[in-house]
Amino acid sequence: MYVCLCEAVTDHQIRALAQEGCTSMRQLGEQTGAGRCCGRCVPMARGILREYQESLNMDLLQTLAQPAA
Ligand code: FES
């Protein structure tokens, strides 16, 4: 779905950029233009970036919680 209508940026694009290391709205804006026009997409785009980071943190915690083999 489109998150940023002004720049035609989708949630898939945002997740792909997050996988490549994009962690902030500043970086996302530099790479896609999202958030740099009307700004209405910022809360949702920021939420997608945060959700991705939280999923990485959960994976890391689960890995650390496993007993050493
Ligand atoms: S909807 Fe993203 S800047 Fe307008």
Image: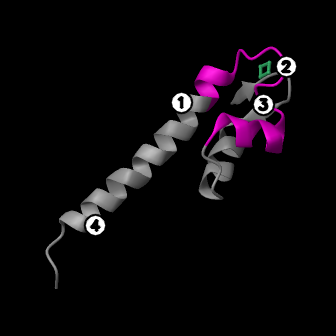
The residue that disc 1 covers is 47
Q: Give the range drawn in magenta.
A: 24-45
Residue at image position (81%, 41%) is 30
Q: Is residue 37 above or below residue 33?
A: above
Alpha-carbon span between mark 1 and mark 2: 18 Å
Checking the image for residue 34, the label placed there is 3
Q: Residues within 10 Å of mark 3 (few under 14, many from 20)?
A: many
The amino acid on which the numbered mark 1 sits, given as a three-letter code, is Gly
Give the total of numbered labels. 4
Question: Within 10 Å of the Cα at label 1, are there few (<14), some (14-19), or many (20+) other Cα atoms?
Answer: few
Task: Please report whichever mark, 3 or 1, sits nearer to the chain's N-terminal start.
Answer: 3
SS of the residue under disc 2: loop
- In the picture, which quadrant includes the C terminus? bottom left
Earlier along the polypeptide chain: callout 4 or callout 2? 2
What residue sits 63% from the left and 30% below the top? 45
Mark 4 — residue?
A: 63
Q: Is the residue indicated by label 3 positioned so its CB lies within 8 Å of ligand 1?
A: yes
Label 4 – label 1 distance at C-alpha? 24 Å
Assess whether mark 1 and mark 4 are in contact (beta carbons under 8 angstroms). no
N-terminal label among 4 and 3: 3
x then y, percent, for residue 33:
84, 34
Q: In this view, does 6 lie to the left or right of 2?
A: right
Q: Residue 37 carries which label?
A: 2
Q: Is mark 2 within 8 Å of ligand 1?
A: yes
Amino acid type shown at disc 4:
Thr
